[in-house]
Every structure is written in structure tokens, then in C-alpha cells.
Image (cartoon, grey):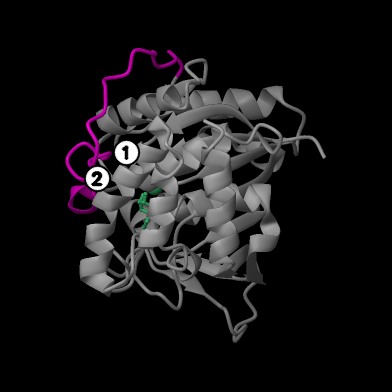
């Protein structure tokens, strides 16, 4: 099977960073056509800079990185420095990047790439708010049918919200964008908190990163040491949930996950439940299923894969 061609749309964030490293370490499974930055965990100037930092950490300075939207489609940006720190990559000291951003806007890059490649051969991997993807679909509706699949991290059902009682951060930041993407009719695989909260960086798993004895292993361990304090305090969990790497792990080994093809709608009107992913998990409506909504993860298999691939960098 040839490697999947992907565009990673991201708001680094420590967990985004690990996802990008996993993708760049797995050329037999994924070809990263480009990385597009979006405002989310921290403002765009930082997410674009962090994307460059991570590509350089992977020693892949030829990776093409594009800056995208600096605010949601119709709302003020909400960020998550309380989770990721002021820089978005708090934990270890990071050198400023030397590689440059591409000149093209991320939204135009997404449009051009989908138009250039054979239809059905490019997968979009959003790891942050869906603003760039939605804007591309609005600006160039012809590209929607060209997308092979969207595999995204976002939403929650049984786990409910992490930024409000009802909503997960990526969807909450830009619910209008999420509605456009979930309603677009593109084959959709969703990694909600229901499954990412099973990907916890326990002490033994973080020690395995450090035991790699590489700069990448040390950085990932230091990021998770920083990133886990929020979830440990809030959930009393045994580590940080590595949300975004679940998207890339799915592309490498989908058998690590299981879920259901169900209908998922996005709340965009109620202030109380804004950004909620209303998943018809029990199929109590006749709404058309539009997403493979994941519910379980083989966590040991996930971390074994992640650690083995990070060791390559
Ligand atoms: O809710 C978790 C998601 O929000 C992750 O993608 C994390 O990086 C933040 O973007
Ligand atoms: Ca993210």
C-alpha cells in the first residue's frame, strides 16, 4: 500500500507536536505534503512558529509549513495557555526556528493541493480548530469532493467537555467551522476525548520516551511532563492524554482503534452547549451517519508504536 498523502492542520500545542513528529517519522505510512498552522491553543504567530520548531526538531527543515487563519470564522479566538503554557510548547527550552514559512496562505495551499492531486488521494488531518479547512471549503467548494478522508481530533460524547461542561476545545473554538466540516459529506474519522483520554502518558511511558536517549525523546518527555499537570489536576488522571497523535496513529495502524459510524451534529446556537458534538451513538434518531466516531484505543499498542517511531528521529 503506498503511503497516505496528508496535510496536517495544527495548533501546536505539545500534543500536536508529538503528532507531527510521529507523521514525519513514518514515511512508509504517510507522506506529509504540508503542515498548515491555525490559531487555537495559542495565537497564530506562535502556532506557526511552533510548527517550524517541530519540523526542525525532526531534522526535516524541508517540510513545507504554511500560516493560516488567525481567528475563528465568526467568533473571538479562545486560547488554552492554561494547558499548553504561554508559548504553546512550554516544558523544555526551545531554540527559535531558522526554517521559513512558505509564502502561500494555508487556505490557498489546501485548495491548490487538493486541485493538483488526483481526487480521492489526499487526506486532511486537522488537529486544532477547523477554521482553515472550513475556509477552504467555503472559498473553493469544488475541492470538497476531492478530499480522500478527514481524520480529525475533536469532540466528545461520553467524556463530555474539556473547555466547557459540554464542549471539547477544538470544536468549541470554532463551532461554525466544525459545522461546515461535519456537514460537508467528506468521509470523516473522529478522534474524540472518549478515545484520546485513553492515551495517557503514564510515568512508565514517559520514562520510555526519555530512555530513547535522543533529543526528540527528551523533548517529548519534557513536553508531557509539563502538559500533564492540567489533566492530572482536573481529572486526577495518571498522565496527559496525547490527543492529536491518535490521528496519525490511526493512519499507521487503524486496528488500534474501534468506533461506530454515527450521526454527529455540532451545536452552534446555544451558549450553554456551544461546540458540543451531539453524537447519536445509540442511533435514536434517523439522522444520517456522517462520521466514524472512535470509542476505544489499544493504549499499550499506541505507545509502543509511538515510541518505536520517535526512536527513528
Ligand atoms: O481538546 C484537545 C485538543 O485541543 C487537542 O488538539 C489540543 O492540542 C487542543 O488543540
Ligand atoms: Ca491541537
Viewport quadrant of the N terminus: top right
Neighbour tally class for label 2: few under 14, some 14-19, many 20 plus, Cα within 10 Å: some
Tag 1 residue:
39
Q: Is residue 218 above or below residue 61?
A: below
Q: Magenta stretch: residue 36 in it?
A: no
Give the residue displayed 50% in from the left and 45% down from the top: 126
Front-most of 55 and 121?
55
Q: Name the image quarter holding residue 299.
A: bottom right
Between disc 2 and disc 1, whose residue precedes?
1
Neighbour tally class for label 1: few under 14, some 14-19, many 20 plus, Cα within 10 Å: many
Tag 2 residue:
77
Tell me the SS state at disc 1.
Answer: loop
Residue 44 at what x, y percent from top left?
29, 32
Left of 173 or right of it: where is 144?
A: right
What is the spatial separation of the Cα atoms under label 2 and label 1, in whole angstroms?
Answer: 8 Å
Q: Magenta stretch: residue 92 in it?
A: yes
Q: Nearer the viewer, mark 2 or mark 1?
A: 1
Q: Name the image quarter holding residue 16.
A: top left
Left of 176 or right of it: where is 45?
A: left
Residue 137 at what x, y percent from top left?
55, 39
Residue 274 at what x, y percent from top left?
32, 66
The answer to whether the residue labelled 2 contacts the one labelled 1, judged by CB atoms less than 8 Å apart, is yes
- Inspect this view and state whether residue 201 appears: no
Secondary structure mostly seen in magenta is loop
Left of 2 or right of it: where is 99?
A: left
Tell me the SS state at disc 2.
Answer: loop
Residue 303 at what x, y percent from top left?
52, 56
Give the residue displayed 52% in from the left and 60% down from the top: 191
Cβ of mark 1 under 8 Å from ligand 1: the answer is no
Q: Which residues are magenta?
A: 77-104
Give the residue displayed 46% in from the left and 74% down from the top: 157
Amino acid at each position: 500500500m503506498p503511503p497516505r498523502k496528508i496535510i496536517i492542520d495544527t495548533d501546536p500545542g505539545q500534543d500536536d507536536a508529538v503528532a507531527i513528529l510521529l507523521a514525519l517519522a513514518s514515511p512508509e505510512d504517510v507522506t506529509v505534503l504540508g503542515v498548515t498552522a491555525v490559531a487555537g491553543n495559542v495565537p497564530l504567530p506562535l502556532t506557526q512558529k511552533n510548527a517550524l520548531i517541530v519540523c526542525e526538531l525532526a531534522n526535516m527543515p524541508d517540510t513545507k509549513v504554511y500560516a493560516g487563519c488567525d481567528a475563528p470564522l465568526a467568533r473571538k479566538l479562545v486560547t488554552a495557555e492554561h494547558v499548553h503554557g504561554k508559548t504553546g510548547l512550554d516544558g523544555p527550552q526551545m531554540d527559535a526556528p531558522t526554517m521559513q514559512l512558505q509564502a502561500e496562505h494555508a487556505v490557498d495551499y489546501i485548495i491548490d493541493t487538493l486541485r493538483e492531486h488526483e481526487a480521492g488521494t489526499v487526506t486532511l488531518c486537522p488537529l486544532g480548530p477547523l477554521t482553515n479547512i472550513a475556509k477552504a471549503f467555503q472559498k473553493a467548494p469544488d475541492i470538497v469532493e476531492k478530499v480522500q478522508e478527514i481524520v480529525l481530533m475533536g469532540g466528545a460524547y461520553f467524556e463530555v467537555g474539556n473547555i466547557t461542561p459540554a464542549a471539547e476545545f477544538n470544536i468549541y473554538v470554532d463551532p461554525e467551522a466544525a459545522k461546515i466540516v461535519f456537514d460537508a459529506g467528506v468521509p470523516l474519522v473522529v478522534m474524540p476525548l472518549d478515545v484520546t483520554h485513553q492515551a495517557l502518558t503514564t510515568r512508565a511511558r514517559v520514562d520510555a520516551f526519555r530512555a530513547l536517549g535522543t533529543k526528540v525523546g527528551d523533548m517529548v518527555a519534557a513536553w508531557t511532563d509539563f502538559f500533564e499537570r492540567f489533566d492530572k489536576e482536573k481529572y486526577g488522571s495518571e498522565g496527559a492524554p496525547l490527543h492529536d497523535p491518535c490521528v496519525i496513529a490511526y493512519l499507521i495502524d487503524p486496528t488500534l482503534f474501534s468506533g461506530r459510524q454515527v450521526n454527529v451534529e455540532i451545536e452552534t446556537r446555544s451558549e450553554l452547549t456551544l461546540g458540543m458534538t451531539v453524537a447519536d451513538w445509540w442511533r435514536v434518531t434517523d439522522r444520517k451517519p456522517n462520521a466514524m466516531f472512535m470509542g476505544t484505543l489499544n493504549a499499550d499498542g499506541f505507545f509502543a508504536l509511538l515510541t518505536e517511531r520517535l526512536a527513528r528521529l
